[in-house]
């Protein structure tokens, strides 16, 4: 009854980045469809290597989109925890796109998040508003304490 995602997070918090990475990769070897593993791998890379982070997030977004199907027109509320990995991948991909100055992709991803989760538990509306106001990722980071 182990939880590889939780174990990876605990390893990372303890400073064992290699152990955390290996745990998530082993999970993906068993099931490539584990969106939570893709989102955590993206999170691991986000600060140092946003292009690599984007690749992890995009895999999760692609798998999630395939699972939903082309005609999906419903919502994925954050309150249902099984929706969260896909929403995390979308958010991570949007943040990476914005950071890498792909404004069109960032805008599309944050807009998609709002359609899928109108309650916007992740704050996509604030990121979208900042993008629409012409703010860059670096300017946003400057606002952080």
Image: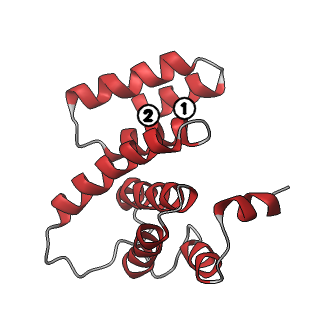
Relative image position of residue 74 (x, y in whole percent) = 26, 80
The colouring scheme, among rainbow, by chain, secondary structure or one colour, is secondary structure
Q: Is residue 26 left or right of residue 54?
A: left
Q: Residue 75 location, x and y as percent?
A: 33, 78
Q: Secondary structure at mark 1?
A: helix
The N terminus, quarter of image: top left
The residue sitting at 47% across, 64% down in the picture is 102
- Report the residue that reaches farthest toward the front: 101
| Residue drawn at the location 46% of the way across and 82% of the way down | 118
Find residue 125 and report its horizontal and vertical position in percent: 57, 79
Q: Is residue 69 left or right of residue 63?
A: left
Please report the residue visible at 85 percent of the width from the left and 55 percent of the height from the top: 145
Comparing 77 with 108, the one in front is: 108
**In the figure, is residue 17 to the left or right of 144?**
left
* Residue at 54 percent of width and 72 percent of height: 124
- Mark 1 Cα within 10 Å, few/some/many (few <14, many 20+)? many
Q: Mark 2 Cα within 10 Å, few/some/many (few <14, many 20+)?
A: some
> Label 2: which residue?
5
Observer-nearest residue: 139 or 89? Answer: 139
Name the secondary structure under disc 2.
helix
Whether residue 3 appears in this view of the structure is no
| Closer-to-camera residue (33/133) | 133
When the figure is inspected, residue 26 is found, relative to residue 76, above or below; the finding is above
Q: Is residue 15 above or below residue 68?
A: above
Which numbered dot is residue 9?
1
Residues under labels 2 and 1: Cα distance? 6 Å
Residue 134 shows in this picture: yes
Disc 2 + disc 1, Cβ < 8 Å: yes
Labelled disc at residue 100: none
Q: Is residue 25 above or below residue 57?
A: above
Q: Residue furthest right?
A: 145
């Amino acid at each position: 009854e182990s939880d590889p995602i939780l174990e990876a997070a605990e390893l990372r918090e303890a400073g064992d980045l290699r152990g955390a990475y290996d745990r998530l990769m082993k999970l993906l070897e068993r099931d490539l469809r584990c969106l939570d593993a893709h989102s955590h791998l993206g999170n691991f890379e986000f600060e140092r290597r946003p292009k690599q982070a984007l690749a992890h997030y995009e895999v999760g977004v692609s798998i999630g989109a395939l699972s939903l199907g082309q005609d999906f027109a419903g919502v994925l509320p954050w309150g249902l925890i099984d929706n969260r990995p896909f929403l995390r991948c979308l958010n991570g991909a949007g943040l990476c796109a914005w950071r890498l100055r792909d404004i069109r992709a960032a805008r599309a991803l944050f807009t998609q998040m709002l359609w899928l989760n109108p309650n916007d538990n992740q704050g996509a509306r604030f990121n979208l508003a900042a993008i629409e106001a012409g703010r860059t990722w670096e300017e946003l980071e400057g606002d952080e304490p």
